Image (tube, grey):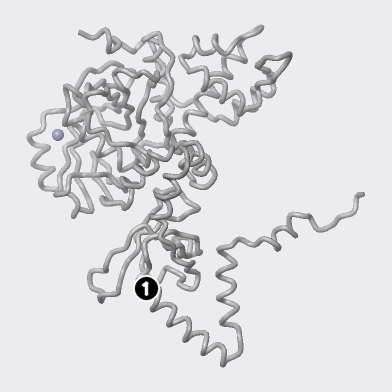
Amino acid sequence: MGSIGTPPSAENGSANPNPATAACDQSIDGYRASSNERALESDVSKKRKSSILPLEVGTRVMCRWRDSKYHPVKVIERRRTHCGGPNDYEYYVHYTEFNRRLDEWVKLDQLDLDSVEAVVDEKVEDKVTSLKMTRHQKRKIDETHVEGHEELDAASLREHEEFTKVKNIATIELGRYEIETWYFSPFPPEYNDSLKLYFCEFCLNFMKRKEQLQRHMRKCDLKHPPGDEIYRSGTLSMFEVDGKKNKVYGQNLCYLAKLFLDHKTLYYDVDLFLFYILCECDDRGCHMVGYFSKEKHSEESYNLACILTLPPYQRKGYGKFLIAFSYELSKKEGKVGTPERPLSDLGLLSYRGYWTRVLLDILKKHKGNISIKELSDMTAIKADDILTTLQSLELIQYRKGQHVICADPKVLDRHLKAAGRGGLDVDVSKLIWTPYKDQG
Ligand SMILES: [Zn+2]
């Protein structure tokens, strides 16, 4: 009692080193052997290199990142370098510890070949296991092993892998901004050889050359998204665009959005969707900062399909504004709503923050008992989302055979503080809108 010993975690730490580090250490130890052995070793190493190069897709290896440290990666794709020999390749890698938006092409010298793990044809293996497993089993595995894919089931995971292999367009120009892209987007094949695309910020047509855009801007008569302006407050505007009436715009928006959304399934059938485009307005026009899409008819009570704030406008509260807006529309429809799954990592974070703020604000002001059903009626948030939010905040207790919301004001304040700022408020009095089912 009271004595200071070695914490058990340190002991565990040395007994179970990270397998990736262990692989590295072994090879380093190899080089530390006697000089004879060292010569032999480097011979072996050379032979090994020639036998493993070029690396196969699926190989796991350590890679030097922009922080100059080595991180584990998986090879997603490879391509011959432009001026290299027949065996000179570059590799498109996914850093297994990081989000996919950091996937990139790397040169061979960034890879620590001594750390190459035995090459397994994972594609074949994956297919076999996913066929054998039930959706539930696969989901469980995804939850524990695949970072950022918590809510993907087997089918959407396969589709996701099909669609998001290698980033194709590196940057886009949109209005005043040049923006680095995050993910692959399936542009028509004639755009595949362009690293940069030029977008008209109003009609979202895209072009391969700056001169084409300049010519377009002289002709394009749009100064805001097509469709109806349904909200205006100060310099902020929201436009509702019907995918059926503005098909090309809807498709262009999907191509653009996919560059920044990992999990988005591209909806070629934009007819079925409404797009809500948030703009900052000035004397040059209304400039898109983000959007969300919504199915016209959803049996699963989805009130939002995709949500995106463009990178130059992130961290300004626009994501929270878009989420709040989607619930205001649901309230006007007299329905409860929930976002379509899977959510992106950033989307999930924003939603958790929104639900926490809205629910805890009510609980703080409310006197007496309140049920989840009542909370749902007041907020248009689906009961399941309310329950999981309150459970994750440990505000639900099981007493006398039923779930009870326990709201200690001090605990509420702590959670509210942790949930961060609410962002820009939606001024409901400025929303002039008729639900789709009632529109002519
Ligand atoms: Zn245009």
Please report the residue visible at 66 percent of the width from the left and 6 percent of the height from the top.
368
Q: Residue at x 45, y 56 (%)?
A: 95
Q: Judging from the image, what secondary structure is the residue with disc 1 in?
A: loop
Residue 92 falls in which quadrant of the image?
A: bottom left
Q: Residue 172: percent from the left, percent from the top?
A: 25, 46
- Farthest residue to the front: give it: 132
Residue 37, relative to residue 400: is it above or below? below
**Amino acid at the residue labelled 1:** Leu
| Whether the residue under disc 1 has CB within 8 Å of ligand 1 | no
Residue 374, image x, y percentages = 55, 9
Occupied quadrant, residue 177: top left
Q: Is 412 left, or right, of 201 in this rendering?
A: right
Identify which residue, 275 or 231, lies in the foreground. Answer: 275
Q: Quadrant of ligand 1?
A: top left
Q: Is residue 167 above or below residue 417?
A: below
Q: Quadrant of residue 311?
A: top left
Residue 13, position in %: x, y?
A: 69, 59
Q: Residues within 10 Å of mark 1 (few under 14, many from 20)?
A: few
Q: Which is nearer the eye, 145 or 88?
A: 145
| The C terminus, quarter of image | top left
Name the residue tied to disc 1: 53
Residue at (49, 46) in percent of width and height: 147
Q: Is residue 384 above or below residue 148?
A: above
